[in-house]
Amino acid sequence: MTSAQQPVPARPTSRDVARAAGVSQATVSLVLGGKWPGRVSETTAQRVRDTAAELGYRPNLAARSLRLGSTRTALLVVPALTNEFFARVYAGAAALAAEHDFGVVLYPSPDGTGPARDPFASARAALDGVIASSMAADALGALHGADLPLVMLDSDPSDTGPAAHVNLDIADGMRQVTDHLLGLGHRRFLHLASAVDTWTFAVRARALHDALGAAGDATVRTVRAPLDVGAGREAAEQALAVAGERPTAIVCDDDILAAGACKAARRLGLRVPDELSVTGFDDLALATALEPELTTVRLPAEQVGERGMEALLAVLDGRPVEPGGLPVDLVVRGSTAPPPAARA
Amino acid sequence: MTSAQQPVPARPTSRDVARAAGVSQATVSLVLGGKWPGRVSETTAQRVRDTAAELGYRPNLAARSLRLGSTRTALLVVPALTNEFFARVYAGAAALAAEHDFGVVLYPSPDGTGPARDPFASARAALDGVIASSMAADALGALHGADLPLVMLDSDPSDTGPAAHVNLDIADGMRQVTDHLLGLGHRRFLHLASAVDTWTFAVRARALHDALGAAGDATVRTVRAPLDVGAGREAAEQALAVAGERPTAIVCDDDILAAGACKAARRLGLRVPDELSVTGFDDLALATALEPELTTVRLPAEQVGERGMEALLAVLDGRPVEPGGLPVDLVVRGSTAPPPAARA
DNA sequence: GCCTCGACGTTATACGTAACACCTCGGGGC
DNA sequence: GCCCCGAGGTGTTACGTATAACGTCGAGGC
């Protein structure tokens, strides 16, 4: 920037291509734009394309965006990419976006710590829309205020601000988990819940309590912990150490917490699943890395991203967004078994 | 786009703010730009800022980029974000970038599958530079050809094309692992190596063989597997099942492979670490989720991202990039112990 | 009393692209 | 012979911003 600017061959513009090809800049734009077929004779078009390739022409995207007033770029707001679930959501969204010549940029929202920077400054270009996963209400307000098409992922459908919702059938997943454990004979439960206060976790709790309530004779205690193996272990260890009848099954809001629960069990000398059943949620890679492998609920993370992008594209085109939650599946593995009492 | 365009109040421009504040557009730019302090009287400046806030003015980034010829945006090329290591690299790079009013967009490079799209089309804006982690040579060629400042992460320093390298002292990490195991008394090793053919893994292999060669009486077999728990388990299981003297330690290129190795051990009825020691690499969250926890090498992933961004900013400013690899640390946990023979 | 000068603003311009409106020209139709 | 028409191109404009170059005006030096 400071010096050595002159000798560098500046990037060729469409005008350079035009000059070299002996046509006007408008023609170059017509040819390379790809729309307007038949507007330019094939011989001329080919000459333009060849010259462009020869010069290594690359359209200036800033200029194009300015002209078009659109960048074909969406912002994806996620709590943290280090959570495999969201990394997969991104992958799904980015893949579908690419098919439609769209881009996805990320805004890892402040998960408690750090100053809440401006999500729109984080995107380095104008945005056509926003896809956001469930997040704190205040951060959400900022997004609403931006009058951009907004698609919410896995969040409260009664929040009618957004243009569309893409939800997982979380309640059904939790119901499947509970029914599975009840079927095995469990009656005393521990719910190792996320300390994060979002819709997706609230639904888990409600579904669990509903399903257990229907069973009549089941009891459940709840402890909450941050989404972290160590925190999950501590919370589970404390809960299991209290006097009174020990739970025979731990239902976790998340595979990460479930990993913590397994560690807690081992520390207390309880074998999983013989003496204690543990279930997770998400079906991360972690679930099959553990021993025993986790019984958990498979969430189609990539599909969430895809459907989110799909919904955004629909909104931008003025098409209606077909509603409907994404189905989730219980995956039974080695971390669940009948409780000790039921094993003769 | 098709209809209902008119009723929407178009986003205010700097000119709208100027009109409302009773000044010229240039003054608005001067005030909001923040440079040129003292160029405008404080009373006027305040009036402009107030009107801007009132109208909800947001500068058009496309126009700014066009004018400035720069977007303050870097492209980060990584194999896959679902690998926690790269998600952390991104987090580090994005955090430092934000401090310098820079943005980071991602290009998850085709890891074998999928058509290699254009990395520069993936970024939806002009780029000021590229930060790339080690990748296949052909993809790398495309980046070199773009005459953009390029910073390579954890890759062959003898590749002199890039503007700068940010490397981890991988060889030292592997040496620490080997010395630790040799010190415990191990002599028969299995190297569970990554099937990916990049510099960072080549260095691991070389360092391992060098360190073992120095020991004199140690032997090592190598098997390779994709970076995947299941694949790692299969490879390890087959290798452990062969006739002859069984290795007493498995050195893995990666925590994910180490998780596979642990599963293989359990399937074969070998207890870790009593009958078989296992080491990982990376210190992912997975390392402490497993039981026993993995002895592994902690890589400062966030720092890699930070230093990469730092180097890019330096190159852009014409400042020299100070070289030097990032140190890595052996973390001894429960997955390593003396071999059975050494335990009286 | 003239000139200078700094403080404060304004006017004008360019960035590179897309696309509207226009121009040219040869070939029919009548 | 005149007009129309479509094919194939070109001139021109606007997008919103940053900043260089240029007023203007009152205070102060000599």
Image (cartoon, coloured by chain):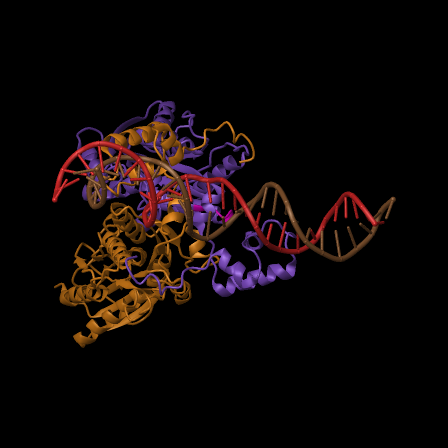
Chain colours: A purple, B orange, C brown, D red
Indicate left or right for A77 with D12 as reference. Answer: left
Foreground residue among B266 and B49: B49
Q: Residue at x 39, y 54 (%)?
A: B108
Q: Please state, as top left, top right, bottom left or bottom right, where the C terminus of chain A lies in the image.
A: top left
Task: Kindly identify the residue that appears in the image at 20 percent across and 70 percent down.
Answer: B187
Q: How many marks?
A: 0
The structure residue drawn at horizontal position 28% and vertical position 63%, both measured from the top left corner, is B164
Which SS does the magenta portion mostly show?
loop
Q: Is residue A219 magenta?
A: no
The quadrant holding residue A170 is top left
Image x and y of residue A251, in percent: 31, 35
**What percent of the width, then of the height, locates residue B221?**
29, 71
Whether residue B244 can be seen here: yes
Q: Nearer the viewer, residue A205 or B136?
A: B136
* Residue closest to the eye, B193 or B59: B59
Indicate the position of residue D11 as horizontal and vertical percent values.
57, 50
The N terminus of chain A, quarter of image: bottom left
- Quadrant of residue A271 within the rendered picture: top left
Regarding residue B124, the answer to whether it shows in the image is: no
Instruction: Determine whether, in the image, residue A159 is placed left or right of residue C3.
Output: right
Nearer to us in this view, C22 or B183: C22
> Residue placed at 37% from the left, 24% from the top?
A210
Residue range in magenta is: A99-103
Which quadrant of the figure has residue B308?
bottom left
A206 with respect to A224 (left or right): right
B317 vs B29: above or below = below
